[in-house]
Image (spheres, rainbow, N blue to C red):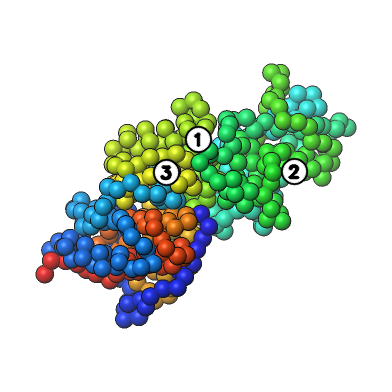
Amino acid sequence: MLIGGIGISSISTAETIDIVPPAPAQIGILQPATVAAEIDSAIVTNLVQEELVDPRLGGGVTAFVIDPNSGKVLVDINGQQAMIPASTLKIFTGIAAMNVLGAQTRFETLVKREGNQLTIIGGGDPTLVSQTPENWRGKPPGSEQPPSLDQLADLAVVAIGPTPEAFVVNFDDSLFESPKAHSTWPDQYLRTGEVAPAQGLIMDFGINDSEAVMKDPAKSAAQYFADALTARGIPATLGERKVAGDTASVLTSIKSATVTDIVERMITTSNNTMAEFLAHHIGGANGQYTYESGAKATTEALTAAQIDLTGVTILDGSGLSRSNQASAKSLVSALSYASKTDGPAWTNLSGLPVAGISGTLVDRYDVGEPGRGTVRAKTGTLSKVVALSGTLVNASGDVLIFTFIANEVPSGTKQGEAALDEVVKALVQCGCRTP
């Protein structure tokens, strides 16, 4: 989704808070609370209900909050109701990717050779970039540098060795089957670069150096590779889209970061292309690299993990489709599963944006506001839709798991996001324990 700021907000009670409650020593594999007594669900529910009447959220907001240490439900406001989840659906995709594909799996881009014919074969790597230098097209800074076509060209030159030959570079993007875009998406999503077409070969998320959308990312990647070979002393021209011949042999290859790294980065930045490519791979594990197969396999993986799928209908991997549905309860169930497992699904928690610090929450929760640095949550934004699903630390040091979804935001989504932030800040400031 596009990242939004706080927008116009009502006066925050943050001004009366001197110290933001510290995070516990471990967030995630959740530790028992050390303060006596238990959280009073009536107090928490009343607090949330008061905040959800904010007119910036419109009507019909759903909420679900639990204490994961005890399993106690603290808030259930139409928590099983099916809602448009927007990008919070990426939590489902991330968990399924880790469980189905495996934490250490990498996607490989191959180059095959048959005489003077080279074929660059896409392995469905959404992180492949064009250039190696420090200005590589990837976010966030500090993450593992993604594989580049420059690196692939360097490897190819070494593998070919000194030669007077000129080469033709063909390209094979056939790993992902048609369609290239989901049938429920508006055409503008591909036109504006909100998401790249599902092609087995792509570079720079389908966006060129001028920030314009590539009409055919696979062809652009092959052209860049041919130019990179030429620049390195091996003349090469662009060929055609076709599969390599049966007698072609592997010349060289380059691999992506691990699925662990890709999922974590996808959750942090809410990158739609990463999410859709992961979903295609999830479907591919069952035989078909398609939107339909990916959605089916994701649902099956979540069911196998015993995640509560009440109100859930999954159609894509990114949450761009307004026909996706999820309940607040289902998203809390998914995060609770991730927090309790010793397996790879944990990455979906470690990748959650940190309030005021990283990802899609970097411009929300100002310095000194409750929750800055301790609230970690996946955002969701579509027209008239805002959602927030994650963890927070309250005034008693408890870690709570929450989801709030609003589907009738009357004005700008930035104002809706700001209103949801106020709900979270109120919970952060509340110990909410029985006297």
Residue 183: in sight, yes or no? yes
Q: Earlier in the sequence, mark 2 or mark 1?
A: 2
Residue under label 2, please give it.
224
- Considering depth in this image, is 168 or 180 the residue closer to the camera? 180
Residue type, label 3: Asn
Kind of residue indicated by mark 2: Tyr
- Residue 100 on image: x %, y %: 42, 34
Tag 1, which secondary structure? helix
Give yes or no for contact between labels 2 and 1 (Cβ–Cβ under 8 Å): no
Q: Whole-percent x and y of residue 266? A: 49, 49
Task: Note whether 313 is above or below 242 in the view shown.
Answer: below
Name the element at disc 3. loop
Neighbours of disc 2 within 10 Å: few (<14), some (14-19), many (20+)? many
**Residue of label 1:** 291
Do callouts 3 and 1 mark residues in contact (Cβ within 8 Å)? no
Q: Which residue is identified by label 3?
A: 324
Circles 2, 3 touching at the beta carbon (< 8 Å):
no
Badge 2 element? helix
Please state if 31 lies on the left or on the right of 125 as rendered: left
Residue closest to the far right: 164
